Image (tube, coloured by chain):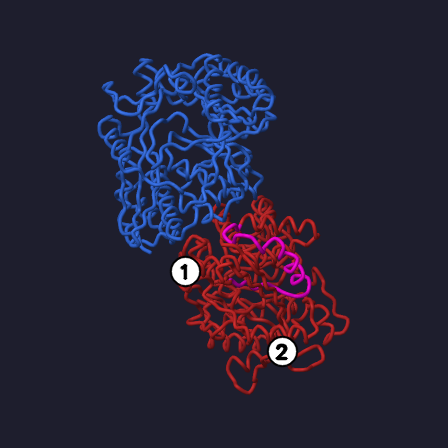
Chain colours: A blue, B red
Amino acid sequence: MKITDMRVTPIAMGDPPLLNAAGLHAPYALRTIVELVSDDGISGVGEVPGGAVTTSALEAAREAVVGADPFARRANLAALEAIAGRLDWSRTTLMRVSSAVDVASHDLIGKAIGKPVVDLLGGAVRERVEFAAYLFYKDEGAGGESATGEELGARIDPSAGGWPAARHARAHEHDEVVAQARAMCDEYGFGSIKLKGGVFSPDHEVVTIRALREAFGPYVPLRLDPNAVWSVETAVKAGEQLVDLLEYYEDPVRGQEAMAEVARRLDLPLATNMCTVAFEHLPQSVRLGSERIILVDHHAWGGLLAAVELDRICATFGRELSMHSNSHLGISLAAMTHLAAASPSLAYAVDTHYPWQSDEVIVGGRFVFDGGSLPVSREPGLGVELDRDALARLHANYVRCGLVERNDEVEMQKTRPGWRFEKTRW
Amino acid sequence: MKITDMRVTPIAMGDPPLLNAAGLHAPYALRTIVELVSDDGISGVGEVPGGAVTTSALEAAREAVVGADPFARRANLAALEAIAGRLDWSRTTLMRVSSAVDVASHDLIGKAIGKPVVDLLGGAVRERVEFAAYLFYKDEGAGGESATGEELGARIDPSAGGWPAARHARAHEHDEVVAQARAMCDEYGFGSIKLKGGVFSPDHEVVTIRALREAFGPYVPLRLDPNAVWSVETAVKAGEQLVDLLEYYEDPVRGQEAMAEVARRLDLPLATNMCTVAFEHLPQSVRLGSERIILVDHHAWGGLLAAVELDRICATFGRELSMHSNSHLGISLAAMTHLAAASPSLAYAVDTHYPWQSDEVIVGGRFVFDGGSLPVSREPGLGVELDRDALARLHANYVRCGLVERNDEVEMQKTRPGWRFEKTRW
């Protein structure tokens, strides 16, 4: 089997004004969809964080991918690494390109042999994958507008009540965040909750966590992610108030040394998707003990094969896995579900931004969660098919919305003039 | 696809009187052959170190294996681990059972989908695999006799000259070992040489290495493996004489702490298949720096899936891979070749005892090396088929030879009365 064609399509999907330490989500989040077509006429798909740089790197990758055997996964990734060296890609770009090609190859292989992707990764160790409610402080609105205010994509009707209304609503204060959590959990059945922090003062965010604990009772695991904009002293001080409230404390501070110091001073499991985000960071992570939980992201670690190998490293070195998310559609959600199903060290409900999106690019529309979880598909490949009409519509959004990269700082400045990202804000 | 039958056949193959730190090889080496048959009528095979304990453990594993999906590799290994806990198997037994089931599952999957095993492990990163000449001090003879002296298996004709004669000949002195090396390299084309040491005094073995270096010139990599029966002081003293002679120094001393001390005191890469032999040993290996090279053995690490995950750990933590061997036949050789082909961190010619055997259990007879290497098969599965007549004959050998376990110490005592294994002999 040979790959005979590679199609690269940048898309933009509606995304609400979610606040985070880097600023504000733009009205559209960018993804790039990759299709690999084989000489058997089968095609496999992948989805990665998008924009102009990723898209053009994927175009440049075509020379290594077309003509390759999709089963030759390690050799194909090595070929991409060689191109990355020649074209001076950043590590992030290489990982995105690798992930797109790796996931699409797995989908293609699975479809060719009639087996789900999880079976190519060693087989399922669980039949369903649990996801977590991913809460954000946010401004009012639901995204889906171009830079000029023109409405392009699927919009949310705030008058509908329930989750659509909550998704549209502002959430700055603790009671607004609790309302968001209630609506999301009612709609999706999530049993774990993560709050993206690093937005308001640490005191404000501790109050929010306390409100969530009071609202949801003692048995719903809570997580807080200040995105590394707190100092060690701030993180320890806030952490002391959070010890009995959190399941884990995600990236309170920046860098492995600072994380290790917080780990030494607090009796609270630390998690990261910021300080240990590549295989080459693991030796220092092990030496310092910078975190107990690694949030794997196959888009950032170079694909599914690499990500299951990270699972073995976690099992070997006393780490646990959770899973990171970015704004994404159903192809990424399917890949995340297969990876989670093949990962014995996964010990937590998986992060997903999926409730924040209303667009979809797969046939049959959006995934439906049951009790906060998804079944692991037994269909061939990822178990999803590209909806070509939706792809065309979302590509038109990309072309028309005017965005070519994610820049949350610029977006934030539109409503908070003079706002600047700070590596350590508190 | 379901596994509907599991056949377990203990076999014995002729094995020459090879000397090592534990004693002497018996006239027969024991292996166990496992066949898994699917509801599609396809079968997959695996080969592991044998004897009564392994064979009965594999029989007990049938309850977990029959009815299982061969693709569910991780779940099937977890089921074996559960049985191991219930039946109080040793770690070695669990690893052998896991390896047999894992390899046979990979063969079955490969045959079912028409792809070589290497493609199930991420695809080949090399097209050929290089092997090393594995030299032994030995007594005269070629094995293949029962405990009562009755000749059962394939014998070697010492009058034939060349490798058959050298395989039969005694090799105690350095010139005898050089003659063995010449004959083996002439026959197989090997370009690297390993000497199993720990048999004679360190001085005697250093003289042998020096003689090999003189005979083969400066460009043939040499390795010495004293099997951990040297003290740290002895290993350092001998090592100082070996620094310019060896490619690597394998297990000169026992345990990770002692290896780490030798590593600190000598400018010579250390390798192990004795002190870091399981995933749970890796954290201390990393902490201490006990070796630079790990000799992976899929029979001892729990199968092919586990072994490729070890490759990623080596790449991540600055280790290299070489490959360990035990007396084996073609099924294991095929599995070793596929694993080596899928392992980017493999940096050395692979150990193999294969030249010491003359039996075979696969259709078409014994593998033929070209220039010391084997091509990576593109045939489905392992690329080998079980020869049922040969299997029956080797099983009859097992029944008649009277051996049920490997015990090199007892065998040694037959010619060296009173000889005892010592953990640190020199």
Q: Position of residue A29 (x, y in %)?
A: 32, 28
Label 1 neighbour load within 10 Å: few <14, some 14-19, many 20+: some
Q: Which residue is mark 1?
A: B114
B265 is higher (above) or lower (below) than B406? above
A18 is higher (above) or lower (below) than B185? above
Does the segment drawn in magenta span residue B56? yes
Circle 2: element type = loop
In front: mark 1 or mark 2? 1
Q: Which mark is residue B144?
A: 2
The magenta stretch is B44-73
Q: Position of residue B184 (x, y in %)?
A: 50, 75
Front-most of A9 and A94?
A9
Circle 1: element type = loop
Front-most of B321 and B376?
B376
Q: Which mark is residue B145?
A: none
Count the numbered circles shown: 2
Q: Position of residue B193 (x, y in %)?
A: 51, 68
| N-term mark: 1 or 2 | 1
